[in-house]
Image: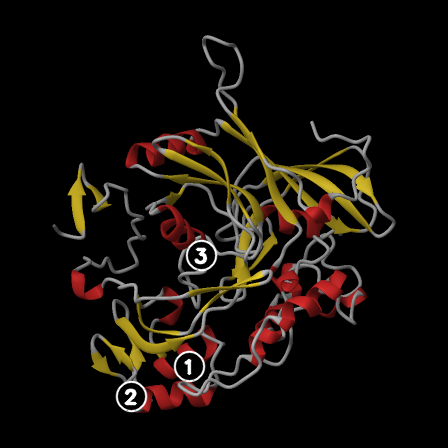
Amino acid sequence: MSAIKKKQNLMCDDFGFKLKVNGSQQVQHKKDKTKEQIDPPYEVIIAGPLRKIKPYYFTYKTFCKERWRDHNVLDIFVNEFRDREYTYYEKAIRTGLIEINNKPATLDSIVKNGAMLTHKIHRHEPVVTSEPIRIVFENEGLLVIDKPSGIPVHPTGRFRFNTVTKILEEKYNYVVHPCNRLDRSTSGLMFLAKTPKGADDMAIQLREREVTKEYVARVVGNFPSGEIIVDKPIRSVNRKVSLNAVCDITDEDAKNAKTIFEKISYDGQTSVVKCKPLTGRTHQIRVHLQYLGHPIANDVIYSDPTIWGPTLGRNGIEEAKGFDKYISKLDEIGKTKNAASWYSAREREGTREQEDNRKHLEHDICSVCDFNSDRDCLLGLSDCELWLHAYRYESTQLDSTTGMKKWSYRTPLPTWAKIIPEAIIIT
């Protein structure tokens, strides 16, 4: 059976799930078996708090992204895939490991719209937490989980088997499709469809705004008391460094965004805050908290004082001054600069947890591909954790029989949020 089939003018996969259709400016690609990603055999290693994947051979395939159009292939790999050095990619091209449209690339090759890039690689996946993915609810069409921080949802970049969908496939033989979006570093409730009907049902509820969402975050400083409402549009500033910002509604690509905040507790340095996003923009909670001058305390994008200065981006950045210097500094993360945040700047010596995690990481050069694992050793799990947790999701619709909400799911609070006094209960 074909990997893709048309159904009611919609593109669907073999399981009947609707596929995302790109905009009109992006070349559409009819998939065939030769372009599918084939999973090789792999081995999982649990080393204390870490889940590791033994290095394996993999052929990575991707179509040209919009930002890659008409750029040099070597420049694309060096700038987009930073786990390897310039010399590695230069050698990979010279030895035929990188192809464009199934033909060996050259150092002078320019990537055109619609091109397929192939990279044969000895892959070293980054480690993730060995904390199990907890199932909150399950029926025949839907799976609700409590996602640990630091695990990507689906294969992306260097990650394949250390992802939510692949871990669930390995453990339960589930083929699931995410219904809501959580960043790798964010923890908490995720909805995954087990069937096309389950995907459609949840998609309708989210689209019709029949779902209320509640997060908790731990932020810099003493957050103001009372209900704080931020009703400020957001736009993507630079996708490469994942930077978003508050903007004027007249700006190109501006999207309305509204979040309600309420302080729960304060420990003398940081506050735990309840966050209710009324819209679902990328990085919405993180950007609105930065705008208030109270970014998430360990947010490596929005709270690093070496990037944002003493105000930490309070009241946004004036468009006239531009974002170039901020983009430039963020772009150095992983090259000449380690990821940092407001919190890590105050914990320069590192926590015992970080040091314990690093003991389980390997410090050596791969004999097969010369990969330098010291890059990963510079990161502990806490560096991949964001103090933002999807705590509760509820239906706004009432059951006609009981008069109660049709469904409501919540998770336990993460450890970092338990500075909350015992007398305070999130309701």
3D distance between C-alphas at marks 3 and 2:
33 Å
Q: Nearer the viewer, residue 248 or 257?
A: 257
Instruction: Give the labeled residue for mark 1.
Output: 75
Callout 1 touching callout 3 (CB < 8 Å): no
14 left or right of 203 in image: left
Label 3's element? loop
Mark found first going from the N terminus, 1 or 2: 1
Q: Amino acid at mark 3?
A: Thr
Residue closest to the far left: 1
Callout 1 touching callout 2 (CB < 8 Å): no
29 left or right of 309 in image: left
Mark found first going from the N terminus, 1 or 3: 1
Query: Few, some or many C-alpha atoms within 10 Å of disc 2 (few <14, some 14-19, many ≥20)?
Result: some
Q: Amino acid at mark 2?
A: Thr
Label 1's element? helix
Q: Position of residue 422 (x, y in %)?
A: 81, 34
Instruction: Give the labeled residue for mark 2.
Output: 106
Instruction: Give the labeled residue for mark 3.
Output: 163
Query: Few, some or many C-alpha atoms within 10 Å of disc 3 (few <14, some 14-19, many ≥20)?
Result: some
Where is residue 78, by image quadrant? bottom left
Visible residue check, residue 417: yes
3D distance between C-alphas at marks 1 and 3:
27 Å
Q: Nearer the viewer, residue 147 or 69?
A: 147
Q: Position of residue 402 (x, y in %)?
A: 50, 9
State whether residue 242 is above or below residue 59: above
